[in-house]
Image (tube, rainbow, N blue to C red):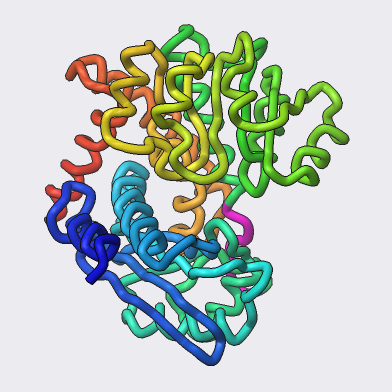
Amino acid sequence: MTDADNGVLHTLFHSDQGGHEQVVLCQDRASGLKAVIALHSTALGPALGGTRFYPYASEEEAVADALNLARGMSYKNAMAGLDHGGGKAVIIGDPEQIKSEALLLAYGRFVASLGGRYVTACDVGTYVRDMDVVARECRWTTGRSPENGGAGDSSVLTAFGVFQGMRASAQHLWGDPTLRGRKVGVAGVGKVGHHLVEHLLEDGAEVVITDVREESVNRITHKHPSVTAVADTDALIRTEGLDIYAPCALGGALNDDSVPVLTAKVVCGAANNQLAHPGIEKDLADRSILYAPDYVVNAGGVIQVADELHGFDFDRCKKKATKIFDTTLAIFARAKNDGIPPAAAADRIAEQRMADAR
């Protein structure tokens, strides 16, 4: 056993970040599939969470990411009021290089073998068309296209929910839920980020963006010349006069390097697992930076895919996603009353719901 293996097993069985019910390692050599399915909790119902397709540096890194993401889904689903536990899957490899119909079908068979304990959907590197393929082998698949009985792209409601979290943050900090005149920096303007930019502009915000993909930036700046683009995330978080920072790419955006130089007064974004390690939430609080917990504000997408299991209704989902505003305000109030950071307050509320279910 390598040190890395031992680290993953220690996380799973012994650390506060573990406690997962089941971890499944999947391999189909014919298609090149290597995947990890992690079920953190089914206390509230079948585990629900997306499938991430990413070129991890190692298998150990992939397992660790699956564990973290699955745990986050338990908390997200609990805070969203869903009757679902938390799970997540990761497929190892570059989707631009190895994704194929055979690979997705093989993956669908592995998900189906869990007999409904895990319901999958889209995530980074997977799309609606991929879920249509997976669903051919697995009926526990959401995020499918409308023509195949699904709800389509969940990034629309994810962005809407983040926008509600921003409005709640503005209400809590400045006494007004509007973002008019506020400068908002969005890091990552892909599937979710570009929808978020539209909400911000419609509300009258000044928007600054960055993305590793030049075409994603150009799509927005060509349509909205008023939007400013900067070279990278490091430049974005140092932008003078920034009111809100919205990390909308991969996790770990709030770390020992970024928090000390962050100019924004609020962090509210779509990315999962934004806190690089325990203690970062206190560093934010010590700098008087208000943090809207990621798994609370980005729950619009999971609200949508959960609804798909019961016959999708967009208006019903949007109404549920609108409640993210009230949930975020309640977390800020709990944090103030308990004298703890908002991330800890959200965890307490979610953990209580899971404990009550057990």
Most foreground residue, 67 or 159: 67
Residue 45 visible here:
no
Occupied quadrant, residue 99: bottom right
Determine whether, in the image, residue 118 is placed left or right of residue 1.
right
Q: Is residue 99 above or below residue 286?
A: below
Query: What is the x, y in percent for residue 276?
Result: 38, 38
- Residue at the farthest bottom position: 30
Is 259 placed above or below 195 here?
A: above
The residue at 59%/14% (across/down) is 242
Q: Nearer the viewer, residue 46 or 34?
A: 34
In percent of width and height, residue 354 lies at: 19, 49
Q: Is residue 287 left or right of residue 227?
A: left
User: Which quadrant is the N terminus positioned in?
Assistant: bottom left
Q: What residue sits 35% from the left and 84% below the top?
A: 113
Give residue 284's quadrant in the image.
Answer: top left
Q: Quadrant of the C terminus?
A: bottom left
Q: Is residue 14 magenta?
A: no
Instruction: Give above or below for 356 relative to 36.
Output: above
First to last magenta residue range:
148-154
- Look at 49% across and 89% down and name the residue there: 29
Furthest residue in direction front, as rendered: 2
Q: Position of residue 148 (x, y in %)?
A: 63, 74
Picture quadrant of residue 115: bottom left
Examine the rendering and report whether any part of residue 37 can be seen.
yes
Is 279 on the left or on the right of 171, as rendered?
left
